[in-house]
Structures are given as structure tokens and as C-alpha cells.
Amino acid sequence: MIINPYVFAGPALDPDAVAFLTAAAITDPTITSAINTLVVDMKGYGIWTKMKAIYPFVGGTATTHKWNLKDPQDTNAAYRLVFNGGMTHSSNGILFGGVNGYGNTFLNANTNLSLNSNHISFYSRTLAVGVQIEIGVFAGPPNKLLHIRPAVNFIAGDVPSATNFTTITDARGFWLGTRRANNDREIYRNGVSEATTTGTDTTDYPIHPIYIGARNFNGASIDFPTSKECAFSTIGDGLTDTEAANFYTAVQNFNTTLTRNV
């Protein structure tokens, strides 16, 4: 008799959680519960449909870390990750090497994101700040950017539209940058607003895929590779203040269940 590892005595698991767990070949009960709760929470908060790529980095290997929870197919079109360079995979996520390591999402910032409704996020478990970029893409000249860089700023659009905040000394936490209109950009850390920008900007995004662990530089190389450990990352549509706060609650609960929260 074949036993379905995703059938328990309690309520049935969410089908989207099962699809991901099946693709990643994960049967660990703690991870199973964490993934299922994350999916249910995100749907309950109304933010599941706003996601294009969700990388929960569970299972501890490159093979399990590559999957997009939102669409767990092993294709570029489904935005599953392809890893390059040096990094360490573990149950805590991915510790990027800070030299040449990154994950290619294959999600084109220009064609796959709406210019005036988008977000990117990165859950950092590393204290050190450094001159590093956690997730992003660049093209130029003229300069077009989309990235998260806690040391200096989050940039949505080109240089004049940069959303800046005071340099920090602790890079840990769930960083999220969102754009909701051509004059509405905001940075959140752990669900709390860090800074906003209301200057109008209509600059297109780069016609290159977004990288995690470094910034895609003109589609030809990387720059500012990070040495941080990432426990979660997403790309998707714009989020409101309430949605950003709820999203943090869901993600923090997820990482707490996996005992890797900061």
C-alpha cells in the first residue's frame, strides 16, 4: 500500500502546499506544517495572489531551495532558481558567499512586473551590513534599477526615484520594498515602514532577470554580491501598509516554526 505523506489525522493540507512539497520531495513534518501554515496565512491575508515568486528555502539543499512555492515547476518560466557561484545551503536557508554566488530567478523585471505595482523582499539572518545588494537588477546607461540594499537604500526605478533611509548597523530581519504608483514607493523592515518616496518617476525597469544574492548587472555579470544568509525571499505585486505588516507576521511565524527566525 502506498502511503501519502501529506495526509494527516487533522485537516487536509492546502493543495498549493502539497504541490510544492511534492516537487521538492519534502516529507519532514515540521517543514510540511510550516509550509502549509504559510500558504494558508498568505491566502487568509489576501496576499497569495499578489505573489509571482516565493522562495521559502526549506530542505537544506540546492535541490530543495530552488523551488518557487507559487509555481513549483522545474522551468525558467515558473521562476525556479538556478544557482551559480559559491554559497552554502542549510536548514537555515542560503548563506551567500559574498564573492560570486547568486540565484537567477529568470523573472524579468521589465516584462514580468508591473512598473507601478511591485515588490521584492529578502529575509536576512546576518547582522553585518556591508556594501552589498541582497536582491536586484541594474541596467544602464541610462540607469535603471530595482534592488534591496539595507546599507544604503532601496531603489525602485532609476536614480532620481531612490527611496533612502539612514544607514543601519544591523541588517537582520525581513526587508521589503514596494511600489504602488509612480509616486508611491516604500521600504519596510519587519512590517514597519522605514522610508517613503513620493517623487514622480516613470522610468522602465531593466530588461533582465532579478538575481537573489547579488545584483544582475546589465545582464552580463553581477555586482555587490552579498555575504548574508537568506531564509526567505519573494517577488510580486505592490503591497499596502496593512499587507506588508501581515506579510511579515506570516513570514516570521513561518521562520519561527523552523527555529531560524531573527
Image (tube, rainbow, N blue to C red):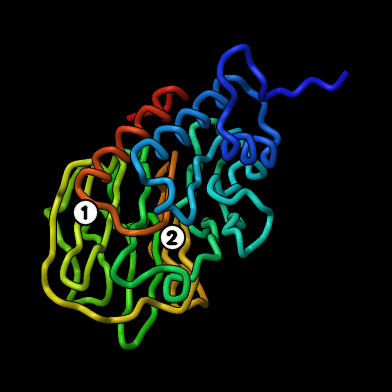
Q: Position of residue 146 (x, y in %)?
A: 33, 67
Q: Position of residue 36 (x, y in %)?
A: 52, 30
Label 1: few (<14), some or many (≥20) within 10 Å? Answer: many
Which of the labelled discs sits on residue 187, or is there none? 1
Of residue 210 and residue 114, the one placed in the foreground of this image is 114
Which of the labelled discs sits on residue 83, or is there none? none
Q: Is residue 42 above or below residue 158?
A: above
Q: Is residue 178 above or below residue 192?
A: below
Q: Amino acid at mark 1?
A: Ile
Kind of element beneath mark 1: strand
Q: Which residue is mark 2?
A: 214
Residue in the picture at 57% in, 14% down = 10
Q: Are marks 2 and 1 in contact (CB under 8 Å)?
A: no
Residue sitting at the far bottom: 141
Is residue 203 left or right of 195 when viewed as pictured?
right
Of residue 127 and residue 186, the one placed in the foreground of this image is 186
Q: Amino acid at mark 2?
A: Ala
Residue in the picture at 27% in, 73% down = 157
Q: Position of residue 240 (x, y in %)?
A: 23, 51
Find residue 83 and report its image quarter: bottom right
Residue sitting at the far top: 9
Q: Can residue 62 be seen?
A: yes
**Of marks 2 and 1, which one's residue comes earlier in the chain?**
1
- Mark 2 or 1, which is nearer the eye? 1
Find residue 196 and report its image quarter: bottom left
Q: Is residue 192 above or below residue 181?
A: above
Is residue 64 left or right of 44 when viewed as pictured?
right
Q: Position of residue 20 (x, y in %)?
A: 62, 40
From the image, which quarter does the C terminus lie in?
A: top left
Label 2: few (<14), some or many (≥20) within 10 Å? Answer: many
Kind of element beneath mark 2: loop
Is residue 190 left or right of 197 when viewed as pictured?
right
